[in-house]
């Protein structure tokens, strides 16, 4: 058996399909061009500048790209491209007409309601139709008209603290979870590092179903510090009082009529620079619970207020405690009193039940 063969470069003319009766299905080689023909018509062309389909491209009988270059997917045509628009059609019916060139900075795409989309400048500018003025980090913005915002210099939020330098007006109730608050004098003039620790009123609110009767529970501590050193005051020329206002309601276990409400006024005081314990008086309905409260030394020159339910001898019991702490300047003979600031630390962190 022998075969015809050759080596080196060979030149061929058009390649005609042997099985095509008309002889018009072929590959037509031309100058820098190859045409693929069926039934004598060009279906696909390859040139150095590109490839071109002359007939629709189909997958599973579905036309994906038409002979004119329109792209379709299912019933919705993905696009019909012209010199001025990109048209999305549905079964040949235009649905949206998009511009073929970009708009200018700040413009947005708008519709005429009939599918014609174009770039347009939005009235008011600012991207989205809003003007913003007086903006700064953490400032909260408020509307000054229908499309203008103003950054409020007196209303800020840093992710933790919401600060309002003005009045808060409300027509409803204010709910405060984990209640504690601090009030400062309206005539406060000091702007130094410890300005907000020299004179203030601080409030706490605690409740517990079973306060311990076997040991005292620490509620808070207070200690005078020296502005000049930033450390606890250890001099001998300070006379000062930290006022206490306590409201307590609960049940005094072991008493036949044990339900009570009591308001107690007291003071933790310092004389000649030394802490001197607790002074108090009270008014009440029901049994006297003032003996529940005591003061213990803490820190360098501080005091801690403690509560021991029922003074011991009975099982623990319920009470709600509302405490206000009043601090201010101390008295002196050498100038120490005006150098004092107060450090108040909440110590109670027990659960309610």
Image (cartoon, grey):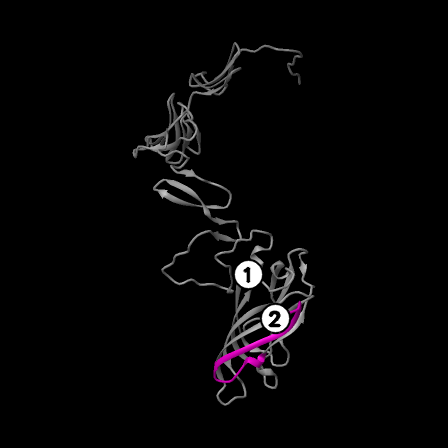
Whether residue 353 is visible: no
Looking at the image, residue 58 sits to the left or right of residue 48; the answer is left
Q: Mark 1 points at which residue?
A: 199
Q: Residue 90 falls in which quadrant of the image?
A: top left
Looking at the image, residue 337 sits to the left or right of residue 245; the answer is right
Work out which quarter of the rendered image holds the C terminus and state it: bottom right
Report, in whole angstroms, how far the alpha carbon at label 1 lies from the one at label 2: 15 Å
At 59% from the left and 51% from the top, the residue drawn is: 192
At 60% from the left and 83% from the top, the residue drawn is: 311
Within-10-Å neighbours for mark 1: few <14, some 14–19, many 20+? some
Q: Tell me the magenta residue range.
A: 268-292
Q: Position of residue 175 (x, y in %)?
A: 44, 63
Q: Does the magenta stretch include residue 287?
A: yes
Q: Name the residue under label 2.
A: 269
Q: In this view, does 48 lie above or below 120?
A: above
Work out which quarter of the rendered image holds the N terminus and state it: top right
Q: Element at badge 1?
A: loop
Q: Element at badge 2?
A: strand
Q: How many labels does the image show?
A: 2
Q: Where is residue 177 in the image (x, y as percent from the top left)?
A: 49, 64
At 51% from the left and 79% from the top, the residue drawn is: 282
Q: Residue 194 falls in which quadrant of the image?
A: bottom right
């Amino acid at each position: 058996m022998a075969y015809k063969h050759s080596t080196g470069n060979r030149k061929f003319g058009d390649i005609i399909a042997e099985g095509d009766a008309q002889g018009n299905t072929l590959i037509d080689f031309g100058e820098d061009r190859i045409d693929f023909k069926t039934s004598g018509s060009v279906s696909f062309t390859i040139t150095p500048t590109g490839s071109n389909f002359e007939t629709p491209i189909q997958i599973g009988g579905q036309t994906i790209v038409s002979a004119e270059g329109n792209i379709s997917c299912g019933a919705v045509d993905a696009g019909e491209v012209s010199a001025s628009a990109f048209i999305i059609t549905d079964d040949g019916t235009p649905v949206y007409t998009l511009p073929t060139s970009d708009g200018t900075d700040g413009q947005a795409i708008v519709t005429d309601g009939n599918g014609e989309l174009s770039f347009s400048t939005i009235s008011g500018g600012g991207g989205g139709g809003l003007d913003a003025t007086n903006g700064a980090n953490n400032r909260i913005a408020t509307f000054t008209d229908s499309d203008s915002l103003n950054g409020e210099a007196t209303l800020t939020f840093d992710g933790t603290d919401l600060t309002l330098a003005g009045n808060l007006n409300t027509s409803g109730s204010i709910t405060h979870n984990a209640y504690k608050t601090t009030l400062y004098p309206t005539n406060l003039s000091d702007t130094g590092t410890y300005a907000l620790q020299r004179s203030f009123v601080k409030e706490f609110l605690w409740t517990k179903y079973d306060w311990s009767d076997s040991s005292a529970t620490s509620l808070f501590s207070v200690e005078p510090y020296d502005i000049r050193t930033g450390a606890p005051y250890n001099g001998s020329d300070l006379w000062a009082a930290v006022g206490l206002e306590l409201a307590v309601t609960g049940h005094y276990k072991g008493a036949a009529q044990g339900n009570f409400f009591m308001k107690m006024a007291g003071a933790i005081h310092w004389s000649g620079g030394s802490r001197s314990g607790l002074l108090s008086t009270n008014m009440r309905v029901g049994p006297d619970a003032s003996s529940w409260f005591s003061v213990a030394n803490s820190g360098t020159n501080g005091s801690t207020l403690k509560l021991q339910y029922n003074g011991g001898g009975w099982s623990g019991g319920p009470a709600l405690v509302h405490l206000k702490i009043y601090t201010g300047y101390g008295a002196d003979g050498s100038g120490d009193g005006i150098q004092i600031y107060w450090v108040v630390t909440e110590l109670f962190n027990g659960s309610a039940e």
